[in-house]
Image (tube, helix red, strand yellow):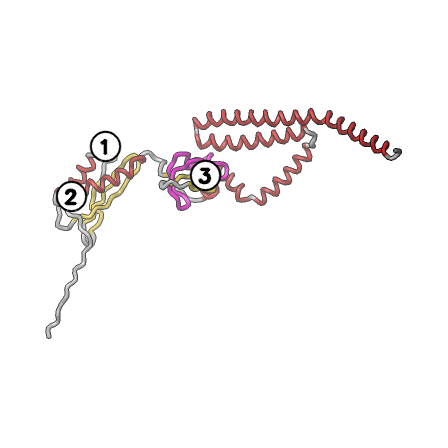
């Protein structure tokens, strides 16, 4: 019996200590949990509001800034919650700083992509919705993220390109200007009337309202080929209908030539067989 009493007393003491610690830390823990939940809700509301305002003005800048603000606010919230439950924030920040340095050294490529994203936003070589050609891909810019740019190709593929590559390498922005020029090369036979072919081409271009008349389309003899006189046709159109005009003009010019006796030659090779006399 003498050995059971001390054990019971120690158990009672431990129970009292646990109850006292629960009374002391449970309110702080509950407050930290409530702060975390409410803080995340407020951050999401705040980020959503910023995203709507900035995206309405500049979709590229809006998505980039909202992503960065969301990360920073959530990091501050986590540090605040950690201090509420008794974790020393000074040592916590020091650990985060050391970890950030180590991660930064390990993720130099990602930091380079981050810097590239900043450069893209500042100098704006392209924006969301532009058609660009970069890194061997051609498509529409869908989103500019903190580290990567998402591009949709015309055959419905999504391409993820690092921002450092886009900011440090050459790219072509097909949406930089509203109007663009197209060149078409059409060969006619040496026996055909060049002036007639030119007039037919001018009439065909004039019938399409999508083709601009200022600058005026240009039709010149570009080359004297082996089997054809090559006409160079240059015209301007809006960028969003450019290729449709190109395809339509190829067909319409071919039909106009066929109806008016203008031939479009193609390479031919004749083989003559000589039978030697015996």
Q: Are marks 3 and 1 in contact (CB under 8 Å)?
A: no
Looking at the image, which is closer to me, 275 or 182?
275
Per the image, the residue denoted by label 3 is 149
Per the image, the residue denoted by label 2 is 257
> Is 1 displayed left or right of 138 in the figure?
right
Q: N-terminal of the two: label 3 or label 1?
A: 3
Looking at the image, which is closer to me, 27 or 173?
27
Looking at the image, which is closer to me, 204 or 219?
204
Answer few, some or many: residues within 10 Å of disc 2's Cα (few below 14, many 20 plus, some between 14 and 19).
Answer: some
Q: N-terminal of the two: label 2 or label 1?
A: 1
SS of the residue at dot 3? strand
User: Measured from the top left, where is residue 82 in percent x and y?
Assistant: 66, 31
Looking at the image, which is closer to me, 88 or 184?
88
User: Measured from the top left, where is residue 266 in percent x and y?
Assistant: 19, 52
Q: Are marks 2 and 3 in contact (CB under 8 Å)?
A: no
CA gap between label 2 and label 1 equals 20 Å
Answer few, some or many: residues within 10 Å of disc 3's Cα (few below 14, many 20 plus, some between 14 and 19).
Answer: many
Q: Is residue 142 visible?
A: yes
Which span of residues is magenta-colored?
118-147
CA gap between label 2 and label 3 equals 46 Å
Tell me which residue sits at (20%, 40%) in the image. Answer: 252
Per the image, the residue denoted by label 1 is 209
> Is 69 displayed left or right of 11 in the figure?
left
Which residue appears farthest toward the left when viewing the image?
277
CA gap between label 3 and label 1 equals 36 Å
Answer few, some or many: residues within 10 Å of disc 1's Cα (few below 14, many 20 plus, some between 14 and 19).
Answer: few
Q: Is residue 124 magenta?
A: yes
Q: Is residue 195 visible?
A: no
């Amino acid at each position: 019996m003498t050995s059971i009493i001390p054990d019971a007393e120690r158990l009672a003491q431990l129970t009292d200590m646990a109850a006292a610690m629960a009374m002391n830390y449970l309110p702080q823990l509950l407050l930290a949990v409530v702060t975390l939940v409410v803080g995340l809700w407020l951050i999401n509301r705040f980020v959503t509001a910023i995203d709507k305002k900035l995206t309405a003005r500049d979709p590229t800048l809006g998505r980039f800034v909202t992503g960065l603000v969301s990360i920073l606010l959530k990091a501050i919230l986590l540090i605040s919650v950690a201090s509420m439950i008794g974790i020393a924030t000074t040592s916590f920040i020091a650990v985060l700083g050391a970890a950030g340095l180590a991660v930064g050294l390990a993720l130099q490529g990602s930091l380079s992509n981050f810097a590239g994203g900043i450069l893209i936003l500042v100098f704006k070589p392209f924006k969301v919705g532009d058609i660009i050609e970069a890194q061997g891909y051609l498509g529409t810019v869908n989103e500019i993220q903190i580290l990567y740019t998402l591009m949709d190709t015309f055959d419905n593929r999504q391409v993820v390109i690092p921002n450092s590559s886009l900011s440090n390498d050459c790219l072509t922005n097909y949406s930089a200007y509203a109007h663009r020029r197209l060149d078409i090369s059409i060969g006619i036979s040496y026996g055909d009337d060049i002036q007639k072919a030119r007039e037919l081409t001018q009439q065909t271009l004039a019938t399409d309202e999508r083709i601009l008349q200022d600058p005026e389309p240009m039709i010149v003899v570009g080359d004297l080929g082996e089997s054809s006189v090559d006409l160079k046709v240059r015209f301007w159109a809006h960028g969003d209908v450019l290729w449709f005009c190109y395809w339509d003009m190829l067909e319409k010019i071919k039909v106009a030539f066929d109806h008016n006796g203008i031939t479009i030659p193609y390479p031919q090779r004749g083989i003559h067989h000589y039978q030697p006399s015996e």
